[in-house]
Amino acid sequence: MKKNSSEIKTIYPERIVKYYSYGDTLEISNVIRDQSIVVLPNRKYAVLSTGEIKDMINKGDTRDSNISSLKRTMRTLRRLISANFNGGVKELWVTLTYRDIITDPKLIYNDFKVFIKKIRKHYGKVEYISVIEPHAKYGKFHLHVLLKSDKKLYIENPHLAKLWGKGFTKTKRLTNKDSIANYVVSYLTNLDTSELSETNISETGKKSIVKGSRLCLYPKGLRIYRKSDGIVDPDEGTDSKKNLIEKYNLSSTPEYVGNYNIKNQDEEEILIIKEFYKKGLKQKSNNKKDIKISRYNLENSDLTI
């Protein structure tokens, strides 16, 4: 939900921030998670500030905690994709499905290992990020894969289907005009309600997208994505906002600001501020009227943030 820009808080220039650098984007946050505990054997942990030993409380069995974990995973995935894919003739987005109802992640990834070996045999060194997606109606899994080569990559879909050999396949070229990471993460998390119908067409004949609802279909503990060795992780660390603006030649005005409210272990409300910048767009103006702004609870936040 958008608010008036006067209600949105930004990070002070001198503030030490957590940052992620990926693609042409720099993401910073005012919250730095310092290590305050040490995990011990037998489901116990030590509080560093007091030395007190406590029992772990398992909060991972609830649906809400699983959704929260999946949202964090999707944010990590978005950064990873942005750091490695930007569209163009060297990249492909492919879908690999099964004829049968398959829900065993180990089997799926073993099949994918065989598949990627065949791809590399025919097309040379190809890097990948592969992601499991559950189907809303049938419960079976399929794979979406981003492929990347150091030369033009073109795979005819009939040949792709032959190499996969398990079911339907689809090949798509994502252009550099697409926001690749946002497109992929939205695809993996949002649910088109036509998937629930027999005809795959909604009652109105139009797509009805429910944002974030596919997250409920992912089972707990599922390793959602995997990557090849040539996929690089985003650069991350801590520094002052002021230093980062100079280092990355940023505009003093962020492209996007998000404000989120969460509660700590003592039920105290904490305001998290996230700012997103495009690298190399340094400007002298501090006019904030064009900033895209948002304020809402982190648990209900859009995954592209």
Image: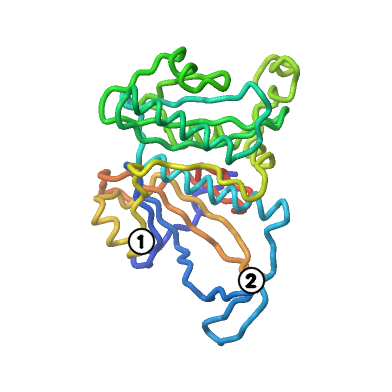
Q: Earlier in the sequence, mark 1 or mark 2?
A: 1
Q: Is residue 287 among what the camera can see?
A: no
What is the number of the mark on residue 139? Answer: none
Q: What kind of element bears circle 2? A: loop
Horizontal and vertical percent for residue 48?
52, 82
Horizontal and vertical percent for residue 279?
29, 45
Q: Is residue 164 among what the camera can see?
A: yes
- Please name the amino acid that badge 1 sits on: Gly
Horizontal and vertical percent for residue 161?
49, 17
- Please name the amino acid that badge 2 sits on: Gln
Q: What kind of element bears circle 1? A: strand
| 237 vs 118: above or below | below
Residue at mark 2 = 265
Give the left or right position of residue 175, taking residue 282 as reference.
right
Horizontal and vertical percent for residue 237?
36, 61
| 158 vs 35: above or below | above
Instruction: Look at 52% across and 76% down and name the residue there.
Output: 36
- The count of marks equals 2
- Residue density around tag 2, few if under 14, some if 14–19, many if 20 or more, within 10 Å: few
Residue at mark 1 = 237
- Residue density around tag 1, few if under 14, some if 14–19, many if 20 or more, within 10 Å: few
